Image: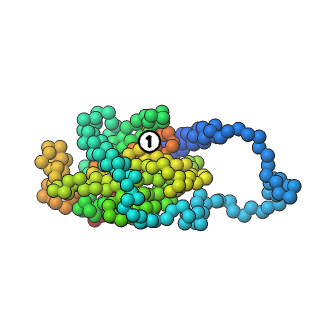
Amino acid sequence: MGNNFCLGKRSFKKKNEIEHQMFIQEIDYQLDKLKEIPYKQYKHPEYENKTIIDLLQVIDIKSTRQSIIEPEQEKEVIKVDEIKPDEFNQYQELGKEIITQIQQKIQEFPLNEKNWSLLLDDTKSPHFLKLFIRQVQLPDGNKINVTFSQFIVPCKSERFIQFMGDFKDQIKLDNRIDQFKCIKKHPEKLEQLIYLSYKSVSIVSARDFVYFKKTEQINKDNDIWCDASRSIIDNSICPIQNKIVRGNIELSGYIIQPLKNVMKQEYFSQRFSTIVFKVDSYSLVQLWSECDFKLSVPLYLAKGQVKQEMANYINLVYRSLL
């Protein structure tokens, strides 16, 4: 009982420390944004020779919370639109680039593993999740936390791709998601423009992303697929809303293939030796995530949060695919 109480106090203290750090980072970010606004003398708006302050004094404000995006705005901003194939030509080079980069990042990971921090190596769970994290500095000087993970799922590649691309299924797995929708999709290829937003949490403002996603079978003989995403800058597609901070997906995606493809490699044959007689029932997923939430969280604080969130998410994904 005493030990549990002490653990509870330490956990509560750590949570407060994380929230305090995130609050400081959020304030710094908002102050930087204010510096970008040119200074000009401000005059209160007037109506019939009365300022807005005078008018507000006689208004009884009933609502204590305003939605970040009103339903009417949502209908205007986010519309699923299946367009003509040639309208996706502008994303052709981007698609090739991110598919190639995801493959390179994942293939080169073993060579750079010493530069990463191992967060979790779960050989007791059926998904065998192994999770790494490292911090990198972007050209603009901002630092972000990058993750790499590998795990297995009890299904074929096509089933996993379909599940990960189902917006309703993904929303069920993460209660932080506010909206997750396709804006435009290619009628013939697995290419989409996607809008994703996260609710505000505690003192942290809501975040959203607009990105291009491409899924492609990169090896037909061995049934290997690659899924890759990157943010795009086009406010005409989905304008930035007040009270929402627009994040940036530098590079995110995964490679999935039948587990039997890699079982001849010593590392994988040892890791999955307990299921060697059932390899045909599984697929191996290697997942890369490099996202800028416009909120700098120190690596030592991010480690615990990422570990818990990723473990919970993969558990839910695995169970959903059974």
Q: Position of residue 103 (x, y in %)?
A: 27, 45
Q: Position of residue 98 (x, y in %)?
A: 34, 47
Residue denoted by label 1: 302
Q: Position of residue 154 (x, y in %)?
A: 24, 61
Which image quarter: residue 156? bottom left
Q: Nearer the viewer, residue 171 or 78?
A: 78
Q: Amino acid at mark 1?
A: Ala
User: Would you say residue 265 is visible in this rendering?
Assistant: yes
- Residue for point 69% across, 62% down: 63
Q: Position of residue 59 (x, y in %)?
A: 79, 61
Image height of 3 relative to 126, above or below: above
- Residue for point 17% across, 49% down: 262
User: Would you say residue 20 is visible in this rendering?
Assistant: no
The total number of labels drawn is 1
- Residue for point 45% across, 65% down: 81
Q: Nearer the viewer, residue 130 or 253?
A: 253
Q: Residues within 10 Å of mark 1 (few under 14, many from 20)?
A: some
- Residue for point 44% across, 49% down: 231
| Residue 72 falls left or right of residue 114 | right
